[in-house]
Image (cartoon, rainbow, N blue to C red):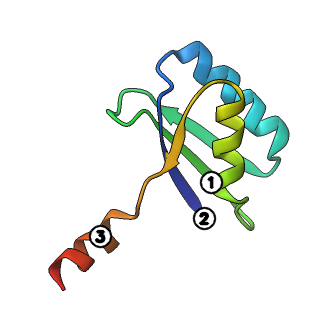
Amino acid sequence: MIEVFKTNVEKHADAKMLLHEIHKIFTGHEANFDLEDCDKILRVKCKEEMAEPSLFIRLLYSFGFRAEVLPDLPCLRYEMIK
């Protein structure tokens, strides 16, 4: 399962520090940032059950950053067509 977050992380050093914390706390999860994307994307992948998204949001918040879950766009497009 993959969860995608919009963040306000801009610096590569901050992203690296946050990834270190995520991997330390959430073992079994893989995470990466796409700071080139306009939404400064954080992707979190888990082979087993995904941790609650609010835990990642709180973790980033504890370091002074914001994050929010990005909606699944294909579902939104379907809802707009209905």
Comparing 29 with 75, the one in front is 75
Determine the image quadrant of residue 57.
top right
User: Which residue is found at the position 79% from the left and 52% from the top?
Assistant: 28
Mark 3 vs 1, N-terminal side: 1
Numbered badge on residue 76 = 3
User: Which residue is found at the position 59% from the left and 24% from the top?
Assistant: 15
- Note whether residue 56 is visible: yes
Q: CA distance from mark 3 to mark 1?
A: 22 Å
Q: Is residue 59 above or below residue 45?
A: above
Q: Amino acid at mark 2?
A: Met
Numbered badge on residue 1 = 2
Residues packed near mark 3 inside 10 Å, few (<14), some (14 to 19) or many (20 plus)? few
Residue identifier under label 1: 45
Determine the image quadrant of residue 58.
top right
Q: Amino acid at mark 3?
A: Leu
- Note whether residue 30 is visible: no
Q: Marks 3 and 1: which is nearer the front?
A: 3
- Where is the C terminus found, in terms of image quarters? bottom left
Image coordinates of residue 36 in percent, x first then y, are 36, 27
> Tag 2, which secondary structure?
loop
> Tag 1, which secondary structure?
strand
Image coordinates of residue 49 in percent, x first then y, are 74, 67
Q: Is residue 81 above or below residue 73?
A: below
User: Which residue is found at the position 64% from the left and 22% from the top?
Assistant: 16
